[in-house]
Amino acid sequence: AAQSTLANVFAGVQMALSDALRVGDKVQVPGLDGKKELGTVEEITLTYVVLNLYDERRMIVPSTHFTQQKFENWTRKHTQQVGMVELYLDYSAPIDSIRAQVDLLLSGTELWDGRSASVDVSDMSDDCQTVRISVSAADSNDLWVLRCYLREQLIQWLVKEVPWALVSRRIQPQEVRYLSRDRSDEEVHRLARKLVGENDPQKG
């Protein structure tokens, strides 16, 4: 127990001297379920770091985590970020029109910081092409809202203006025919007597 405490103390001193982590930084670390958690550094002590997560939870991370394992510091040098929005569209999708619509949407919002924006076909599969939209924002919060804004507006525009550009999967059910045969009671009895006669050993 003492070794663990001392290790965290030394880690806290190391962080203070190296200035690798500061209050207000946005960092991403593994959570309890193995998935990455993004939070803002709220407090730094000699033994642990307090992160304020997006849903207002507080995550207590031992100081040794930041000296012995990798972590992402999204605001180490600056807060600016670049993010992606991907659309899966039919091969008939008008890429030039999509570029024009993205330019129109970006020019009408303050979420975009004006640094970079691009629309490219980044991949393809058997039934669709992947259109990747790359945009920049002043910080991670603006970037998240900007990506959601673009995704929502582009989907509405595609549905209204170029619905044929959306991927559609056509499934044709197999046609099944049922044949019914009407048999009268007399024919059923005749077939039954014939069957019994064929199986009667005395008539063999």
Image: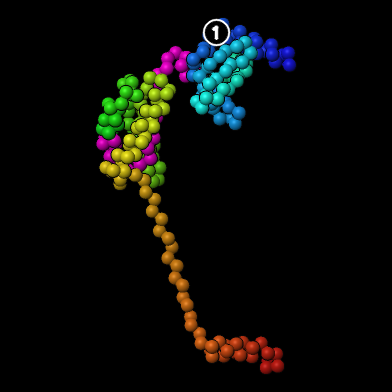
Which residue is painted at 66% across and 87% down in the image? Answer: 199
**Residue 111 visible in the shown view:** yes
Most foreground residue, 59 or 72? 59
Horizontal and vertical percent for residue 182? Answer: 48, 82
Which residue is painted at 57% across and 18% down in the image? Answer: 50
Under tag 1, what secondary structure?
A: helix
Count of number-bearing discs? 1
**Residue 82 visible in the shown view:** no
The residue under label 1 is: 18
Horizontal and vertical percent for residue 46? Answer: 62, 10
In this view, 197 is above or below 48? below
Q: Give the range drawn in magenta.
A: 73-98
Most foreground residue, 110 or 188? 110
- Colour mapping used in the image: rainbow
Q: Quadrant of residue 44?
A: top right
The C terminus is located in which quarter?
A: bottom right
Q: Residue 53 magenta-drawn?
A: no
Which amino acid type corresponds to the residue marked 1 in the rendered image? Ser
Most foreground residue, 36 or 203? 36
Left or right relative to 158: residue 173: right
Most foreground residue, 157 or 119? 157
The N terminus is located in which quarter?
A: top right
Horizontal and vertical percent for residue 90? Answer: 34, 44
Horizontal and vertical percent for residue 167? Answer: 36, 46
Q: In which quarter of the image is residue 138?
A: top left
